Amino acid sequence: MHQLNPYGQDALTSRLQTIIASGRTPHALLVSGAKGGLLPIALHTARMILCTGEVAAPCEQCQACLMSKSLAHPDLHFSFPTVSKDKKPSTSSSFLNQWRDLVLADSYLSSEEWFDSLDSKNKQVNISKDECLDIVRRISLKSFQSKHKVLVLWLAEYLGKDGNRLLKLIEEPPEGTIFILVTEQKDRLLTTITSRCQDINVPPLKDEAIISYLRERHAIADDDAQTIALLAGGDIQAARKLMQSDTAELPQLMVQWFRLAYIGDPSEMIAFGDEIASRSREDKKQFFKFGLSFVRELLLAQSVGPDAVRLRGQVKASALKLSSVIDASQGLEIAHLFEDMLLGVARNANARLQMTHASLELNRLLKTRRQTIADRSLSTSTIRYGL
Ligand SMILES: [Zn+2]
C-alpha cells in the first residue's frame, strides 16, 4: 500500500472517486470529522484530482501520480500554520521541505507534532496575513501541467481574520482550481468560509484499520496492536501516541487485578495497588482507560456473545470467565469507579489511597453478584426442598 494512502476509509474514498470521475468536483471541500485521519484523506483526494490515469484511484502509474506521491506535483500546493522567525514574513513556502519530510514519513502527522517541530513554544502559530497573500498569488498563477490546480490548506482553523482575504478566491476560484480545507475544529472557522465549502466528514476508524496501520507501518505485533486499538478510539494519531507508552502488559494487569479483587485477599490487593500507584501519571491514566475498555468488552460478551469481544488469547478466555460472574449493572458501576479514578489521576489525588479504595470497591462490586447468586441458589433450594 502506498505510504500516503489512508487506512480503512474505502467507503469514503470511493465516494470521492465517483464525484471526481463525474467531473463535478466542488471547487471547495472542507475535510473534518475524526481528528486523527483528516490529512491522509485530503492528500488522497488531491492526488485523485490530479491523476490522469483511466481509473484515478489514484493510478500510481501516470506522470502526475509519480510526482504527487512525493508531494512534488507543481500544481499541488500546500498551506499550513507556521511561526514567524526573526520577524520575517512567515509563509508555508519557507517551511515546505520540513513539512513535506514529516508528512512523507507519516501522513498521520498530528498538529501537536507539527507545532513541536516548529519549536513553537511561546510563539504564535497561525496562517498569517503574508501566507494568505501568498495563496492569492500562487492560485492566480497558471497551472503547469494539469488542468487542475489543488491547494490543500491544513488546519484551516488557524486562519485568523486575514482568512477573509481568501473568501472571494474560494467563492469564485480561477477555472480548474480546487481548495481542500482541512480542520480539526470546524467551529473555529469563519462561517463565511464554511458556507462556501462542501463538507467531507471523515468517520472514526475500525480497530482492524488501526491494527493494519500499526502492523504495516510500525511492525507492531498483533496482540499489542489490538490493545492499542482498544484504547485509541478509532484515531491513528492517538494510537501513535500510545505506541510510545507501555501498553502491552495492560490486558494481563487488568485480568490480574480483577482476579485479586474477586478473591479478596486484602494484603494482595494492597500490594498490587501500591505497584500501580508507583507508576507515572500517564501510565495510571492508561491503566484506567484500558479498564473502561475492558469492562465494555465484558458487557459485550454478555449481551452479544464471545465473538463480539475484541480481546485475544488468554486474556479473552479470562474476560469471558469474568463476564459470567458480573451483570450489566455491576459492569456500569465498575465503569463509574474507573471514571472516578481517571478524574483522581487528572487531579493528582493521592495515588496509593486511590488504588486501595479502588481495589476494595472492585472487591465489593464483584462480591455483590456472588452474594446475589448465593442467595438465589439458597432460595431455589429452599423451594426445592420445601424448607
Ligand atoms: Zn495517476
Image (tube, helix red, strand yellow):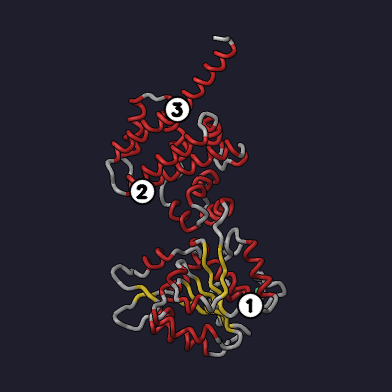
Q: Residue furthest right?
A: 54
What residue is shown at x 56% (from left), y 51% (from top)?
A: 207
Circle nearer the N terminus (3, 2): 2
Q: Taking 303 as reference, is 153 above or below it?
A: below
In the figure, residue 157 lies in which quadrant? Answer: bottom left
Residue that numbered label 2 is attached to: 282
SS for dot 1:
loop
Residue that numbered label 3 is attached to: 368
Which dot, 3 or 1, sits closer to the camera? 3
Where residue 210 appears, as percent x and y from the top left, is 54, 54
In the figure, residue 66 lies in which quadrant? Answer: bottom right
Amino acid type, mark 1: Thr
Number of other residues with Cα within 10 Å of mark 2, as a class: few under 14, some 14 to 19, many 20 or more: few
Amino acid type, mark 3: Thr
Amino acid type, mark 2: Glu
Q: Taking 147 as reference, is 7 above or below it?
A: above
Give the Cα separation between the discs numbered 1 and 2. Answer: 44 Å
Circle nearer the N terminus (3, 1): 1
Q: Quadrant of ligand 1?
A: bottom right
Where residue 118 appears, as percent x and y from the top left, is 36, 70
